[in-house]
Image: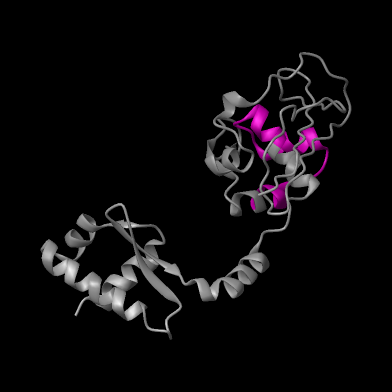
Amino acid sequence: MYESKIEAVLFVSGNPVHFDRLCEIFSLPPDEMLTELESLEKMKEDKNSGLSLIKLDGAYQLCTKQETSEHVKKFLEMKKSPPLSKAALEVLAITAYHQPVTRSFIEQVRGIDSSSIVTGLEEKGLLVECGHLDAPGRPALFTTTEAFLRSFGLDSLDALPELPDEFSLDNGQMSLDFDEKGKGVPSDDEFSTENGIKSDEAHNNKELSLNKQSDNN
């Protein structure tokens, strides 16, 4: 009776859903919920189904069957995000060390319009608008996100290496190599000085080069 509904909940969740939570969602006593789950499990055992129901430490989850792995893997390979462009990495590096920042700040550092890049990084979940600057026009302020930290293998912004106090002026080069999956994991010595950056809004003139070893995973 509830098999299809339980299947739908597990499908949209994507993650394991605890047994008690399922009982709460469907207002069923434990014995009835167990019966429904056993029935759903039998349904998924049908050879025409590409999914199976698994139990993980008191929680239930739908997963793909082994025989579908080749096609699932191919799909995931096609779905991979392309590596971030050099310009996008520059914007991330500038934001990471000076946040919160405005678009105009980023553009002063880079010396070029960066609106489309900022928007793209927002869409990828690497930058987020966090408020507005108390200035004429109240420009939006941006910061990096938790997704940014995960992508670069950082526990927190405190894990960013300190930058030297003095740098040359002119435009800076900020680069980061991504692995084939498009997710960066910094090397032990991921930051090195290359060129200087200049910004009238910054307290100090700084330059950043962010390098990463390719991840083998």
Where does residue 118 sit, x and y in percent of width and height? Answer: 67, 47
Which x, y percent locates residue 63?
43, 67
Residue 100, quarter of the rendered image: top right
Residue in front for this viewpoint, 118 or 103: 118
**As drawn, 205 above or below 184:** above
The residue furthest bottom is 48
- Residue 3 image offset from top left, x and y in percent: 25, 76
The correct choice, above or below, for 96 with respect to 31 in the image is: above
- For image coordinates 60% across by 45% down, the residue present is 126
Q: Which of the two residues, 44 or 90, is positioned nearer the viewer here?
A: 44
Depicted 75 relative to depicted 156: above or below: below
Instruction: Name the residue rendered at 71%, 18% in the picture.
Output: 203
Q: Which residues, given as a range, are shown in magenta?
A: 93-119
Res 141 visible: no
Q: How is the image coloured?
A: one colour
Query: Quick check: is 96 in the magenta stretch?
Result: yes
Tell me which secondary structure the magenta stretch mostly adopts: helix
Q: Is residue 181 visible?
A: yes
* Closer-to-camera residue (56/7): 56
